[in-house]
Amino acid sequence: MGREIQSPQEQSSYTVEQLVAVNPFNPEILPDLENYVNEQVKSQTYSLDANLCLLRLYQFEPERMNTHIVARILVKALMAMPAPDFSLCLFLIPERVQMEEQFKALIVLSHYLETGRFQQLWDEAAKNRHILEAVPGFEQAIQAYAIHLLSLTYQKVPRSVLAEALNMDGASLDKFIELQVTNSGWIVEKEDGSIVLQQNEFNHPELKKNIGENVPLEHIARIFPILG
């Protein structure tokens, strides 16, 4: 037997998260989920589960799909990189909708982010400000992702590379670097101004723990009979 559909009176006493957990396939919660997307935008919060639930409901109620809401969901998903949220959301959006210009632009942005092509990303973002500016915090979220990606790859980056990745220059870049020096342990080299990034197990492999060192002896003992 399926879950009983809650009455409007019963639903009003639930939070959106509870509605998603209790009755995720009830079309009556669709307006609540749409309002919740706008609330996420306004409060700069994020709920992937609620947004995926809304996209699934749109699949069952295609005539009720609000493409402005869908675009906001996808922008929020881009802001969650490197999590795969954008792909998860896109999978639930019909291909005919994906062919609309605003969604084609967001898909291009996703590709540039995944491949670390930040100059092209910022150029494309500038062409689509009308979509992105509707969701506060986009630029800051992408800059944080850029730093994450650079830190996985490089021990040290030239200032020019950092400027391109962050879409910053001049005083604003100086201020950003100073903040990272204070909070994240960056070092600015005096010779050429290059930035030494915070050490991690990816840009300093010697920091990566040897997995074998952490395998209990009894686990190793179990393997020998299998190999024999």
Image (spheres, grey):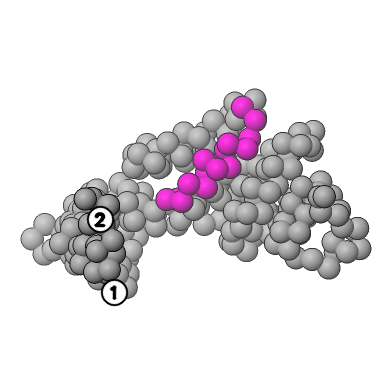
Task: Kindly identify which numbered label has been placed on residue 182.
Answer: 1
N-term-proximal mark, 2 vs 1: 1
Q: Calculate the distance from the C-alpha at mark 2 to the C-alpha at mark 1.
A: 53 Å
Horizontal side of residue 31 vs 37, given as left or right? right
- What amino acid is found at the position of numbered circle 2 in the picture? Pro
**Residue 171 is inside the magenta segment:** no
Residue 118 locus on image (x, y percent): 35, 42
Residue displayed at 76% across by 59% down: 22
**Based on the displayed image, in which of its 4 quarters is residue 36 positioned?**
bottom right
Picture quadrant of residue 99:
top right
The reply to whether dot 2 and dot 1 touch (C-beta < 8 Å) is no
Q: Give the residue pinned by disc 2.
A: 225
Between 148 and 164, which is closer to the camera in this rendering? Answer: 148
x and y percent of residue 31 in the render? 80, 50
Front tag of 2 and 1: 2
At 73% from the left and 63% from the top, the residue drawn is 18
Q: Is residue 100 left or right of residue 146?
A: right
* Residue 42 position in % (x across, y down): 64, 60
Q: Which residues are magenta?
A: 81-95
> Dot 2, crowdedness within 10 Å: few (<14), some or many (≥20)?
few
Q: Determine the image quadrant of residue 215.
A: bottom left
